[in-house]
Image (cartoon, rainbow, N blue to C red):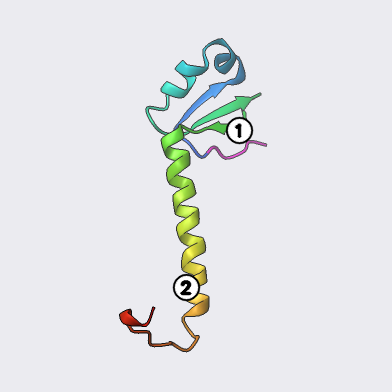
Amino acid sequence: MTNQTFSKVAVSISELKKNPMAAVASGKGFPVAVLNRNNPVFYCVPAAVYEALLDILDDRELIAVVSERSAEPSIRVGLNEF
């Protein structure tokens, strides 16, 4: 049974151990699947991609909060009230 790999580039654990930076660089800015016996065991994700992923997840959480609160009644507030 083979597992699906969610990246275009894959390296073995041995390759990662020999030269971690070269393994990451082989993805050219995209995630790299790390394989053990031809099965992906984890993904090496560049910092910029990881940060963007966290931003997307944060945005989705905020969208959920806004959607949840959109049915609540509005309260008019003037700028000079505070």
Q: What residue do we see at 49% from left, 85% from top?
A: 71
Residue 3 forms part of the magenta stretch? yes
Secondary element type, mark 2: helix
Image quarter hosting the N terminus: top right
* Amino acid type indicated by mark 1: Phe
Is 68 above or below relative to 51? Answer: below
Is 66 above or below relative to 10? Answer: below
Secondary element type, mark 1: strand
Dot in front, 1 or 2: 2
The residue nearer to you, when weighing 77 against 2, is 77
The picture places residue 76, in percent across and down from the top left corner, at 38, 87
The mark found on residue 29 in the picture is none
The image quarter in which residue 51 lies: top left
Magenta stretch secondary structure, dominant: loop
The picture places residue 13, in percent across and down from the top left corner, at 61, 20
Residue at the far left: name it: 79
Is 59 above or below relative to 49? Answer: below
* Amino acid type indicated by mark 2: Val
* Number of dots carrying numbers: 2
Q: What residue do we see at 48% from left, 75% from top?
A: 67
Q: Which residues are magenta?
A: 1-5
The picture places residue 42, in percent across and down from the top left corner, at 60, 33
The residue nearer to you, when weighing 82 against 42, is 82
Is 55 above or below relative to 6? Answer: below
The picture places residue 39, in percent across and down from the top left corner, at 63, 30
Q: What residue do we see at 47% from left, 46% from top?
A: 53
Decide: few, some or many residues near mark 1? Use Cα within 10 Å; few <14, some 14-19, many ≥20: some
Q: CA distance from mark 1 to mark 2?
A: 34 Å
Per the image, the residue denoted by label 1 is 42
The residue nearer to you, when weighing 50 against 39, is 50
